[in-house]
Image (spheres, rainbow, N blue to C red):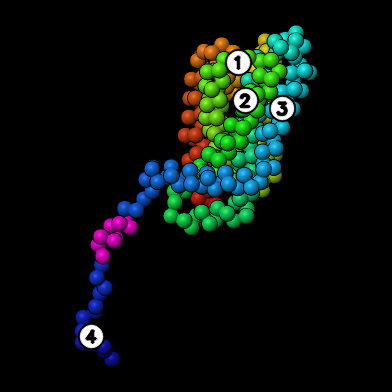
Amino acid sequence: MTTTLDSPIQRAPINIEATRTQARRSITLVETVAQSFSLAYRSVVKMMRNPEQFFDVVLQPIIFTLMFTYIFGGAISGDTASYLPVIIPGILVQTVIVTSIVTGTQLREDMNKGVFDRFRSLPIARISPLAGALLADVIRYLLATVITFGVGIAMGWRPDPLGVLGSTLLVLVCSFAVSWIFALMGCLMKKASAVQGISMLIMFPLTFMSNAFVPVETMPGWLQSFVNVNPVSHLVTAVRELCNDGTVGIHVVWSLIGAAVIVAIFAPLAVRAYIRTAK
């Protein structure tokens, strides 16, 4: 039995212009930046509605500065006034860098709640949800920086005003770069507690095994070798040069290069891990 077609098959007309529009539809750099700041604004609103998220950046600089200054100041520098130019930059770097751990923790919590599943359904750049969350946390870093400098000045420290501005920008840039490491950890791990625990194990040795609190010369030789190449030591020295001497030294350059390398490596890895979680 055969079937004969009496009329040719009718095909729907193809809208060539619409097809081309869909084919070339991609997110431009300007759109990516705009989307990232839009999602950063969302995160800022969320933080403002939950002020307890600022407790660590408000209390930690005050407690650590007072504790380290009055406990170690006399033993290391002879008196607290002489120790302030040493300890304030160290406390600043430690506080802001450790604060960036919260970025990965909150990122994992939002993922577990399904917030990022909604972002994946939107026609936005894949990096925008991550970049937006990290940009919003810059406010927390800035708050920790201002409080640390304020406590130091109240205790008698007199830094160079331009150096304070320069070191603030430097610390914010470096902290934003480091937060990409914890963003990657937030995408890879299943629980926020795991992100926080492993991040602490990484960051506390890096901050304490540096020149942030004591002179490097007082350490064993094998430890000095590590401290001298520790990125945290370069950042602390850069802040000290800017605030105490008002000079821009080689450590500022190394800190910025290190920040650029971290972003170049960990930002693509974090985005790739974020995309894989959607599958």
Q: Which mark is residue 159?
A: 1
- Earlier residue among tags 2 and 3: 3
Q: In this view, does 195 lie above or below 203?
A: below
Percent position (x, y) of residue 73?
75, 14
Residue range (magenta) = 15-23
- Disc 1 and disc 3: Cα gap in Å? 18 Å
Instruction: Identify the residue at horizontal 63%, vertical 30% (top origin).
Output: 144
Say if the magenta span includes residue 18. Answer: yes
Q: What element carries label 1?
A: loop
- Earlier residue among tags 3 and 4: 4
- Earlier residue among tags 2 and 4: 4
Q: Which amino acid does label 3 sit on?
A: Ile
Residue under label 3: 62
Q: Which mark is residue 140?
A: none
Q: What element carries label 2?
A: helix
Residue under label 4: 5
Instruction: Identify the residue at horizontal 50%, vertical 39% (top origin).
Output: 267
34 to the left or right of 25: right
Q: Which residue lies furthest to the bottom in this view?
A: 1
Percent position (x, y) of residue 181?
57, 37
Determine whether label 4 and label 1 are within 8 Å by CB: no
